[in-house]
Image (cartoon, helix red, strand yellow):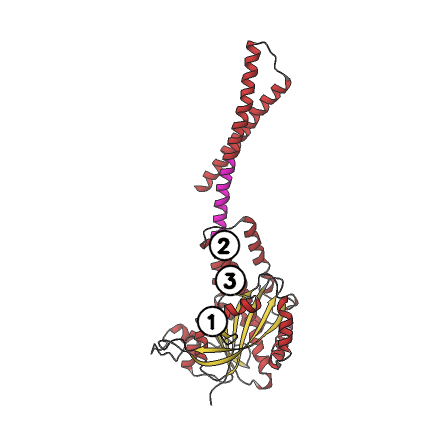
Amino acid sequence: MKMKSDIFILIPCHVDKSYYHIETTSTNLKEKDKYAQEYISSLREIAMSELVDRVYNSFDRYYLGEYESPILGDAPKGREAIDTVRIKFFLTACERTKLSVLTGVICNFEGNPTNVLDQITREEILVDLDDRFTYLDDFLLRNFKIIKNGEAKTCLIQNKKANYEDILYYMATETNDSNLYNTKIISKKYHDLAVDNVAVYDFSDIFVSESVIYQVLHDEGEDKIQYEGLLIFIVEILVMKLSAIYRSNNQVTEALEKNKGISVKNYEILSNEFANTLSIWQVNIYRYKGAQTIADKIQERFDIDNVLKNYKQNDEFLQNIIDTRNVKNSITESKILFVVAILLFLKDFYAIVKNIYLFFYESQEFSASDVVSSLTSVAIILVVVFVYLSKNFRIKGRRK
């Protein structure tokens, strides 16, 4: 008898405008699917119980329907389908931040789960849409206006513990059924992960690597969806955090790669957009220490802090570009101002020379307005020269 697996594929996403266009479609689909009703109800109850109100109240949950998806074979045979599965898609969305997590659920899968994990790693999830297989990114954008913005994380859940060799491949998210390579995993890293049980409660064992969580339920019974949900809701929050980082980092990276920088106004919008997400994934959002403990461990294995560090480095680089551009603009503006002031001064200087000539050679007296105009012109040119020189000294000081 083959071991059955439940596979949850969690993908960071966002929308540009709103999720409201999904609500009607989701409601109609959910009414026809008993599992979808139970799943959403269970996740809502768990999140309400486990999360502080300010976070729980931020999320809406939608059902996007069930679709057929092919499992692709490994090279060198090519990318032909060796199996097919049914995937139910759910969306956990935050309307305020426009962030979301798409969860693809494959229930009671009896095939080789490493083939699925390998395909997820290659970002080759396909959806049968109108008798034509479409990449998940295109499917989401075309049907729901949802933008995938980062790599997937996977929860593989079984009711019996797999053998040690299989767990190694789970941790590495690679297929153990390759037609191209006849190799074995010898990395100490994955051997250590395959035996490091990070579970907090006794109803399951949990093993975690960079991209996959392998959970073994000891006694699932009728409460299977509840036990699975206790893990899924934690991973949802972490993937939501990744979605926030990926979205901002993608925008920053795009600006850097196009070598066009970004306006100060747009940069402020981007920074405020990221800051607006902090409340839904900062520390101390869990009511119970057990959930916080497992969340901290998964975050460490997912290397989320390093992803955040990468974003901050790119953001700092972009800030430097903006500062440099502002300095160049400031130099240009001061030069223009200086030229304009010189032209105005020359105009008034001509009037002064003319009046002096008339005073000495034609005995015409200075009017009060001529004196004021002359003094004003001298004052203006002195001020402009001072400002121009001080700006240039400051700029040279910055460059040293």
Residue 18 in percent (x, y) is at 61, 63
Q: Residue at x 57, y 80 (%)?
A: 227
How many numbered badges does the structure rendering display?
3
Residue for badge 3: 246
Q: Quadrant of residue 350?
A: top right
Label 1 belongs to which residue? Answer: 211
Task: Using the image as rendered, state which of residue 261 and residue 385 is in the foreground.
Answer: 261
Decide: marks 2, 3 in contact (CB < 8 A)? no
Give the quadrant of residue 66.
bottom right
Most foreground residue, 265 or 288:
265
- CA gap between label 2 and label 1 equals 25 Å
Q: Name the kind of residue labelled 3 in the image.
A: Tyr
Q: Is residue 55 visible?
A: no
Range covered by the magenta-colored residues: 317-334
Question: Disc 1 or 3, which lies upstream in sequence?
Answer: 1
Figure quadrant of residue 276? bottom right
CA separation in Å, label 1 and label 3: 15 Å
Would residue 90 appear left or right of 160 to someone viewing this image? Answer: right
Q: Is residue 37 left or right of residue 168?
A: right
- Figure check: 396 above or below 32: above
The structure residue drawn at horizontal position 64% and vertical position 70%, both measured from the top left corner, is: 23
Position in image of residue 171 (x %, y %):
44, 75
- The residue carrying pointer 2 sits among few (fewer than 14), some (14 to 19) or many (20 or more) residues within 10 Å by Cα, namely many
- What amino acid type should be assigned to the residue bearing mark 1? Ser
Residue 146, image x and y in percent? 56, 66
Asked if residue 330 is among those painted magenta in the image, a careful observer would answer yes
Q: Give whichever of 88, 392 is nearer the camera.
A: 88
Earlier along the polypeptide chain: callout 2 or callout 3? 3
**Image depth: mark 1 or mark 3 in front:** 3
Label placed on residue 315:
2
